Amino acid sequence: MSPTVVILACLGFFLDQRVRAHVGGQDKPFCSAWPSAVVPQGGHVTLWCHYRPGFNIFTLYKEDGVPVPELYKRIFWNSFLISPVTAAHAGTYRCRVFHPHSPTEWSAPSNPLVIMVTGLYEKPSLSAQPGPTVPTGENMTLSCSSRRSFDMYHLSREGEAHELRLPAVPSVNGTFQADFPLGPATHGGNYRCFGSLRDSPYEWSDPSDPLPVSVTGNPSSSWPSPTEPSFKTGIVTHLPAVIRYSVATIFLTILLFFLHRCWCSDKKTEGPQAPTTSRCVLGSAHEMMTQKCPPSCFDDSVSYRCCCNGPRACGGQNSQQGGP
């Protein structure tokens, strides 16, 4: 198999894989919420569908809970604003990106994005044991409780997107409580807790009053919420895709370079072709007719043998006189 055929086969395979990745073979968008996925009832939240540059049109759908009519059979540009937020908006969302060069193709579904709506029930209370101020390394427990029969409690720290969850259990004083052990304390911060019911896990109560926790000997630190779109978050999220497409582009350039070299080499090897001419040498008339020599090779007085493929094909034969 010639090098040109091999390179063309590799090039076709590469282009096929690139198209498959564009239309959702292995790549998928990233769905996020801003300013937060925990939204108070009556507030607003913007849902973003992140993908490669040039892919700005997407569709958004809700996987569970109450259907959202404004999402039905609609496409969006870059983002979708939900305002005002109601209990019906609580649930799991995914997005798919529209491929601009293929009207019938959409990307694979994005990661699941869970939107929690707060303010649907009265707030629980939050307390700390042994107290809200502890030395570095000492164990601490935060207790969330309410007289309402919540099934689950959610504890969050200001500046963090992820919450801790524990089932509520009845206590001796008639409340429903969950105790969150934080282990050896290293950082302080403001904590809140929420309550929810088993039948509607994404519909939460009002937040408890904030509980400031102080750790002596180690200053409090905070981290940005990963749900907030930012330049660094976008780079980290799409870094594998950027690396993959950079390598693919380099590979395509090398393939095209070698294809061009092989094509130029073939043209040089062929060189100029020798002109095809007929040459007459002495021989019999029968040989001339058999080889279909041109009329110029015939003579009434003498017979010739001809070579119709030019001087090179004649094999360097010497002219000889021949009889009929």
Image (cartoon, grey):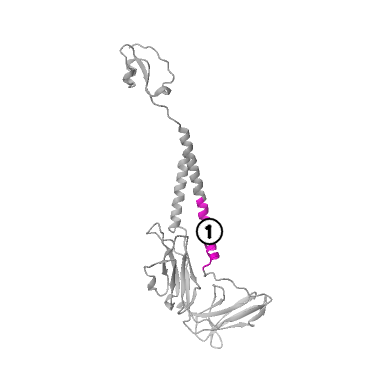
Identity of the residue furthest to the bottom in this view: 173
Up-down relation of residue 145 to residue 252 (above or below) = below
Secondary structure mostly seen in the magenta stretch: helix
Q: Residue at x 45, y 53 (%)?
A: 17
Residue 68 versus residue 310 in the image, above or below: below
**Residue 296, x across and y down, in percent:** 33, 19
Residue 181 in the magenta stretch? The answer is: no
Q: Nearer the viewer, residue 266 or 115?
A: 266
Q: Which residues are magenta?
A: 229-249
Residue lying at 53% horizontally and 58% vertically, measured from the top left: 240
Picture quarter with the C terminus:
top left
Residue 80 in sight in this render:
yes
Q: Quadrant of residue 322?
A: top left
In the rendering, at what x and y percent does residue 200 appear?
45, 77
Q: Residue 238: within the magenta?
A: yes
In this rendering, position of residue 250 left or right of residue 24? right
Residue 196 percent across, percent down from the top left: 49, 79
Q: Amino acid at mark 1?
A: Pro
**Pick the front one: 123 or 73:** 73
Is label 1 in a helix, a strand or a loop? helix
* Other residues around mark 1 within 10 Å, as few (<14) / some (14–19) / many (≥20): few
Q: What residue is shown with label 1?
A: 240
136 lies left or right of 270? right
**As drawn, is 206 to the left or to the right of 98?**
right
Q: Quadrant of the rendered structure where residue 191 is?
A: bottom right
Give 151 or 154, whichever is nearer the viewer. 154
Horizontal and vertical percent for residue 244? 52, 55
Look at the image and tell me whether residue 2 can be seen: no
Lateral position of residue 132 relative to residue 283, left or right: right
